Image: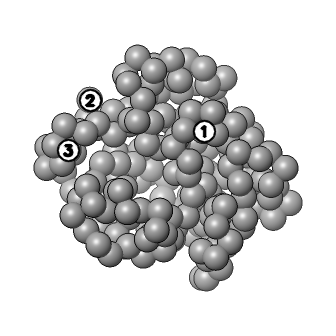
Amino acid sequence: MITVGRKTELCEIAEKWGTDKYFYYTAFYHSLLDARRHKTKKVLELGIGSPATMLDSLSRVKRTDYTTGASLFTWETYFPHARIYGLDIDRSILINKGRIKSFYCDQTKPETYPYKDIGCGFDLIVDDAKHEKEPQLLAANMLVPLLARDGIYIIEDVGYLPREERIKFLRGIPYPAQLEEFSNPALGPHIAAVIVVRP
């Protein structure tokens, strides 16, 4: 179990943009990704996030503001040489600005994954879309093959599952993977968790 504490540069960037990743994941992500920052060329996030979809997260941390695509802007700032790609089911929130390009994708429907538009060779892919086991497994099977040789794939927010189910989920992923669990004393007993895949 990782207790949220030390503030990193990625924490500060995430806090600036208002992504809820700041409340659990960013110190760990910084330790995982900092040495790769200037070599990272392609990043993909499944699930762009909008005020409508973030209501539960925002209420838990007592915030009312949210920037659509906050995570995409966080990655664009953190990785200065990377192209940032976003995928989302809501066409009205797609962002195409600066180094960010985004496309329609329904995580549950393989035929909607826009392979021709996004290509492959991703250094980092983050699934922050539908927080349900079957869509998360489908997305992993669809997207892990798009990673660069030493790329990292992260399935966020698997803390909705009881711990024994998280372990079962981890064992069902057909790639080398590890479970990371987080607590934030400021936010009570809630446990957040991610699965980190490194094929």
Percent of width and height locating residue 199: 63, 31
Q: SS for tag 2?
A: loop
Q: Which mark is residue 1?
A: 2
Q: Between 120 and 116, which is closer to the camera in this rendering? A: 116
Question: What distance separates the C-alpha of mark 2 from that of mark 3?
Answer: 10 Å
Within the image, what quadrant is residue 115 found in?
bottom right
Q: 10 Å neighbourhood of mark 2: few (<14), some, or many (≥20)?
A: few
Q: Mark 2: which amino acid?
A: Met
The foreground one among 112 and 183 is 112
Q: Quadrant of the N terminus?
A: top left
Q: CA distance from mark 2 to mark 1?
A: 22 Å
Percent position of residue 108, x then y: 71, 45
- Binning the other alpha carbons within 10 Å of mark 3 as few (below 14), some (14 to 19) or many (20 upward) gives some
* Numbered disc 1: secondary structure: helix
Q: Residue at x 45, y 21 (%)?
A: 165
Q: Is residue 191 above or below residue 25?
A: above
